[in-house]
Amino acid sequence: MIYSLLGDSELLKELFVKSKVSCPTIIFPDDSDRFAKLERTVTSSLMFAENDGVWLKKFRNWNKQEKTAAVTLIKKMGATLSFFVEDEALEESEKVNFKLPKSWDKKGWERFISELALKLGVDIEKSAVEKMFELFGGKEWILFSELKKLKALNRKITLKDVEYYCYIMNATTSEEIATDILKNVNSSVVIGKIEKSGVVFPQLLSSLSKLLFELGLIEEAFSSSSDISGNWKSILKLEKITGIKAGRIAKFTGFAFSGTVGGTNLVALYSPKELRKSLVELQKLDESYKKGDLNDKSGLLQLLSLFRK
């Protein structure tokens, strides 16, 4: 069976895949041997009569030649094996849309929380759902984590349960913690922030991957333009080249605004080679976590050791 996984909810895509197969082979667009890995997986599945599924992450980012070859193979084997193709609507596939509500859509998010609770087998009162949205907004991974925790109560979840057992979100975000990790902030400080904020491991991986990718774009722009320096005019030029907002570039490069002291220059802290290697390692951690080889604690320890300088 071929499934096209559309929409912007990474959580719902993962839950859907896990509802169909137990341990899918995950292939990322940055895997250097992605098509060869797809062929090996198909061959192995046929040889051993297994159908653990193949999950092609961000398939739209594959190059045209490999994508064409992959689609041909997928269509040929789709009646025998399960394929989950992310962000690309293939012909002859079952198209499933996992669209998140708009950030301002309170009713939409309350429906999302109720439906997620149902998927997890959590019986929850309407007032408790409303309180969860008030506490966590549209942070799907945090909502998932808190609902799993509430499930352990083994009863209908009330407003008082949410108020008593759920963490109240503070101003600390997964991106802020990811930035601390890249800055080599003391591990105990980082772990403390994670515990207080309720940020979960998949969120942290996602934020780190995004930061590393953006740092790579900025470094590439620096190396390709000889007239870029550390002034504000150069920041604005980098914005045009990379598509990253000037404020974020200033933050990443430690730019000092008038009357302020500049921060850590993350662009100077990591070489292009280190960025590429780190992205590969993050993908491996993500795959291990999804397979169940890592939990939140063991994953975090490996994550911190990865960026320790």
Image (cartoon, rainbow, N blue to C red):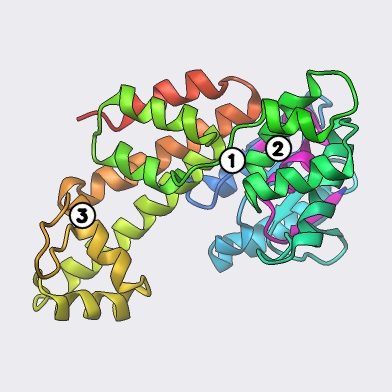
Name the spot of residue 219 as percent of width and height, x first.
23, 61
Q: Are marks 2 and 3 in contact (CB under 8 Å)?
A: no
Q: Toward the viewer: 274 or 32? A: 274
Q: Are marks 3 and 1 in contact (CB under 8 Å)?
A: no
Q: Toward the viewer: 67 or 139? A: 139
Inspect this view and state whether residue 122 appears: yes
On residue 193, which mark appears? none
- The residue indicated by pointer 1 is 37
On residue 267, which mark appears? 3
Q: Are marks 1 and 2 in contact (CB under 8 Å)?
A: no
Specify the segment rendered in magenta.
2-25
Q: Is residue 69 magenta?
A: no
Q: Nearer the viewer, mark 2 or mark 3?
A: 2
Name the spot of residue 270 as percent of width and height, x first.
21, 46
Q: Which of marks 1 and 3 precedes in the sequence?
A: 1
The amino acid type of the residue labelled 2 equals Phe
Q: Is residue 20 magenta?
A: yes
Marks counted in the figure total: 3
Judged left or right of residue 157, residue 235 is left
- The residue indicated by pointer 2 is 144
Circle 2 residues within 10 Å: few <14, some 14–19, many ≥20? some
Judged left or right of residue 211, residue 2 is right
Q: Which of marks 2 and 1 precedes in the sequence?
A: 1
Inspect this view and state whether residue 20 appears: no
Q: Nearer the viewer, mark 1 or mark 2?
A: 2
* Residue pictured at 43% horizontal, 53% vertical: 210
The amino acid type of the residue labelled 1 equals Lys
Alpha carbon distance from label 1 to label 2: 31 Å
Alpha carbon distance from label 2 to label 3: 34 Å
Name the spot of residue 216 as percent of width and height, x first.
30, 57
* Label 2: element kind: helix
The amino acid type of the residue labelled 3 equals Val
